[in-house]
Image (spheres, rainbow, N blue to C red):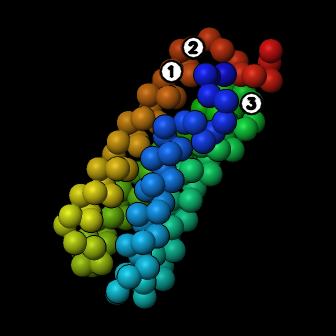
Amino acid sequence: MTGFKNFEDIESWQIARRLANEIYVISGRGKFSKDFVLRDQMRRASISVLSNIAEGFERGGNAEFIQFLSVAKGSVGEIRAQTYVALDCQYMDQAQFERIHAMATELSRKLAALIAYLRNSGMKGVRYK
C-alpha cells in the first residue's frame, strides 16, 4: 500500500483532525452554535473527512483506499463551500474563514496528491501481499 503503518501517520489525516477541531471550536460559539443545520452539517463533513481516510486505509487495498480518499476529498469541498455561508452569515470573522479555508484547500491538495500517488504506484495494498 504505502509506507504508512497506521492511518494516524498520514499527513492528510492529521490535517483533517486539526480542521475538525477548528470547526468544532468555531461552530460552538455565538450565533453559529444556534444555527443547528449549518453547524451540524459542517461538523459531519469534518468528521467524514478523517473517518473516510481512516476507513479506507484500514481496508488494506489501494483501490478501496482511493475510493474513500475521494469521498474525503468531496467532504473537504463541502466544508469549503460551507465556510462561505458561515462567513456570509457572520458566524465567523475573516481571519477564521481564511484559516479554515486555507486548511481545507491544503487538505484537498494533499488528498489529490495521495490519490495520484496510489493510482500510479502499481501497488494493490497490504491485503494482496
Q: Is residue 28 left or right of residue 50?
A: left
Q: In the image, what residue type sits under mark 2?
A: Ser
Quadrant location of residue 125? top right
**Residue shown at the point (56%, 22%) measured from the top left:** 118
**Residue shown at the point (50%, 45%) measured from the top left:** 14
**Which residue in the protein does label 2 denote?**
121
Mark-to-mark CA distance, 2 and 3: 15 Å
**Which residue in the protein does label 1 denote?**
117
* Figure check: 91 above or below 24: below
Label of residue 71 in the image: none
> In what element is the residue under mark 2?
helix
* Figure check: 27 above or below 15: below
**Marks 1 and 2 in Cβ contact (< 8 Å):** yes
**Marks 3 and 1 in Cβ contact (< 8 Å):** no
Q: Which residue, as the protein is rendered here, is positioned at the far top?
A: 122
The tally of labels here is 3
**Residue shown at the point (53%, 44%) measured from the top left:** 13
Q: Which residue, as the protein is rendered here, is positioned at the far left?
A: 94
Mark-to-mark CA distance, 3 and 1: 16 Å
Q: Name the N-terminal-most of marks 2 and 3.
A: 3
Q: Is residue 120 left or right of residue 35?
A: right
**Which residue in the protein does label 3 denote?**
60
**Residue shown at the point (57%, 56%) measured from the top left:** 48
Q: Position of residue 41 (x, y in %)?
A: 50, 69
Mark-to-mark CA distance, 1 and 2: 6 Å
Q: In the image, what residue type sits under mark 1?
A: Tyr
Q: Name the N-terminal-most of marks 3 and 1.
A: 3
Q: Position of residue 11 (x, y in %)?
A: 49, 37
